[in-house]
Amino acid sequence: MTQPFHIGVSSDFRTDVPGALEPVLARILDPLPHVTWAYYDSPSDGAVSPAAIADCDGVIVLSSNYRAESFTGSDRLAIVARWGVGYDRIDTAALTSNDVLLAITVDAVRRPVAEAIVTLLLALAKKLPAKDRIVRTGRWDLKAQTFGLGLTGKTLGSIGVGNIGGEMFRLFAPFDFGRRIAYDPYTSAERAAQLNVELVDLETVFRESDFVTVNCPLTPETQGIVNAERLALMKPTAYLINTARGPIVNQADLTAALQAGQIAGAGLDVFEEEPLDINHPLIQMDNVILSPHALAWTDELYELNGELACENALAVLQGNVPRWPVNRDVLARPGFQAKLAALRKRWTALTGGG
C-alpha cells in the first residue's frame, strides 16, 4: 500500500500567529485524503531536530531554525515551504546539500509590506505621533509647532528595488516625489526604467534622499549596511524606514544618530533582537515610530501566505517545482530529482493521476 504524504507544520504558528494558518490548512489540505498534516516541535532557541521531521515529506514553517544538524539521518524531506519571504534562520546550503528545496511566498507579502512602508512614511512626514500626543495631553497650543513635511518634490530612496521595493515605488506614484532613487546591484536598468526609478550608488541614496527605505534581504553583504558612516551622510531633515530585517541596520549606530539629531526620525517594524528591550532608548524617542514586526500582518497577508505555502508544498509532493524556489542549485542535483520522481510516482498511485 502506498504511504500517504505527510506535511509538518512548525509549532510556532500556534503561539506566534494563532488562527492565521489553520483555516487555510482546513480548506486546502484537509479535503485531500492522501495528505496528512501535524505540528512538529520548532524550538525558538535551536535548530529543528531530525526526529521532529523524520516522517515529513514537506514542512510549512514560520520561524523554524533549519541547520545542517536538522538533517542528520533523515532523507525523506523534500520541501521547506516558508510562510513569508525571509529565510535568514534557514541554512540554505544545508538544505541544498540534503536535496531539500526552500520556497517562499513572494506574491503574498509584496503589497502588505509595501503598504506598511507607505504607512510609516506618511505618519512620519505628517508627524502623526506628535499630533496624537497634542490631543491626548490637551496641548493644542503646540499644533503650529508640529507642522509636517510635504512630499511634492522630495526624494524617495530605497536600498533594494526588488519585489517589495518595486511595489513601494508603484504605490507612491501619485505622490509627485521629485526623484525616486535606489541602490540595487541586482536590478536591471530596464526594470528600474519601468518603475521610473534612477539607479544610483549606495552613498547617493543616503546623501540625497528625504526618506531612505530598506527593501533588501538580510545577507552577509547587507548585514549592517546601514551604519554610522552612512547615517552621517543623511540630511538632518531625512527619515529612515526599515520593514525588512533588523540586522540590516546597525541599531546602536541608528540610536546614536537619532539621539544626536543627525536625522529627523525613523520608522521601524524590525529590530536586531526581537522583542525589543522595553528599556531600549528607541522606545523613549518621540521622533521614532515602532511596530512589533507585524505592520504588514493583515487578513490579506495571512490568507495568501497560507495559500501559497500550501501550494508550494503540494507542488513538490506532485513532483513539480513551485514558483518561487530560493536555493535553485538544488534543482540540478540528482538526489533532488530522484525525490521529485518518487513523489510524482506516489502522487499518481494515490490519486490515480489526479
Image: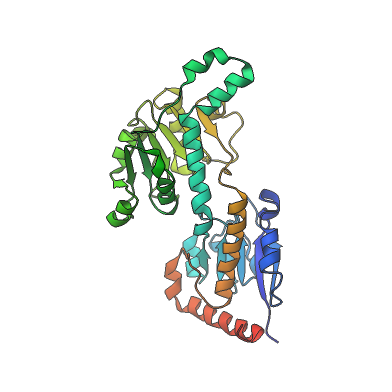
| Quarter of the image where the N terminus is located | bottom right
In-image side of 193 versus 69 (left or right): left
| Placement of 181 over or under 12, stated as above or below | above
| Placement of 80 over or under 152, stated as above or below | below
Mark count: 0
In-image side of 4 versus 245 (left or right): right
| Placement of 96 over or under 217, stated as above or below | below
Is any part of residue 51 visible from this angle? no
Q: Residue at x 42, y 69 (%)?
A: 329
In-image side of 272 versus 40 (left or right): left
Q: Residue at x 50, y 58 (%)?
A: 107
Q: Residue at x 55, y 67 (%)?
A: 312
Is any part of residue 76 visible from this angle? yes
In-image side of 351 versus 326 (left or right): right
- Foreground pick, 138 / 293: 138
- Foreground pick, 46 / 288: 288
Q: Position of residue 51 (x, y in %)?
A: 66, 66
Q: Position of residue 113 (x, y in %)?
A: 51, 47
- Foreground pick, 153 / 41: 153
- Foreground pick, 244 / 307: 307
